Amino acid sequence: MTKLKPSSAAATSFRSQLGANRPLVLPGVFDGLSARLAARAGFQAIFIGGFSVVGTRYGVPDIGLKSLTDIRSAVADITEACPLPALVDIDDGYGDVKNAVNTVWSYERLGVSAFILEDQVWPKRCGHLGSKRVVEPGVMAEKLAAVRAERSSPDTFVFARTDARAVHGLDDAMRRGERYLRAGADGLFIEAPESVEELERIGRAFDVPMIANPLEGGKTPILKPDEYFQLGFEVLPYGLHLLMRVAQVMEQALNDLSTQTFAMGYEDTAMSFERYLEVVGLPEWDRLVDEHGGRNDG
């Protein structure tokens, strides 16, 4: 059972999950319910990406339509509901050096201990969409150096993401990765390599924690977690794995309801009422009331 009581922000960090000689598989969650389900399923950490958050919370695509304030509110809901360490996508930091530092501070106050900071020009786009633009590498390097110097805890982990592969080619993306590490990044995320050969080249080049992005419908080959790990990628955020399946189920359920053509046995495809109440923590709340009083018996 997932406990209701929030854990200390310092009790479990993302950094502590690294280096275990296994791939760190991160389910992409987008609200308190999906986060609680991830914890119940036994995951050690979670990923909170802008694509899923702005899609589920606001019904818009990941093209820079929402700000730090909009996305932070979703992250706050998730971290309050789930004790697992979270890797949070913070886009470009929502501005210049001071904005990037402020963004990290804002999330650190929520207990977040790992971030992905990217080098796209704002308004950004999902990493597997076309028409992306990237800033000069010096601009990104300044942000990384500032975040490293000013982060509230030395345990806070920052992945530098570059989208230069799609804009200038893999060679430029690799050079940017090297520069971003010198500037203070703890790990790297070279977004959207387009073949296993490119994954192999990236994995061999860097001896730091690396992200690969298994994105349904994206540009990067979909491999098994152990295969990515053997190529040198330890951190695997499955950002769309849950979202796309949930969206499909909701669409089908709504179609059933609107057409009144419920399939035979459709009830068996739904979570039971009792199980749902367990997921959202009703037994824990009942225990609290039983132990401490407060029932309104009239």
Image (cartoon, grey):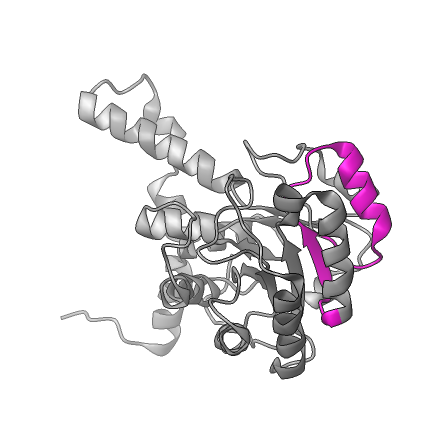
Asked if residue 189 lies in the magenta stretch, the reply is yes
Q: Is residue 182 left or right of residue 88?
A: right
- Outermost residue toward the left? 298
Residue 4 screen position, x and y as percent = 45, 66
Q: Is residue 11 visible?
A: no
| Magenta segment boundaries in residue numbering | 183-210
Q: Quadrant of residue 222?
A: top right
Residue 34, x across and y down, in percent: 45, 50
Name above or below for residue 207 compared with residue 201.
Answer: below
Residue 66, image x, y percentages: 37, 58
Identify the residue at image location x=75%, y=41%: 228
Q: Is residue 19 above or below residue 133?
A: below
Image location (x, y in percent) of residue 31: 41, 54
Q: Is residue 146 left or right of residue 80?
A: right
Given residues 112 and 259, the one toward you in this image is 112
Can you say which quadrant of the picture contains the C terminus? bottom left
Q: Residue at x 68, y 46 (%)?
A: 212
Q: Is residue 143 visible?
A: yes
Q: Is residue 266 magenta?
A: no
Instruction: Report how many numbered discs are placed on residues in the image.
Output: 0
In the drawing, does residue 246 fall left or right of residue 134? left
Asked whether 176 or 56 is in front, the reply is 176
What residue is at 64 percent from the left and 81 percent from the top?
153
Q: Residue at x 19, y 21 (%)?
A: 260
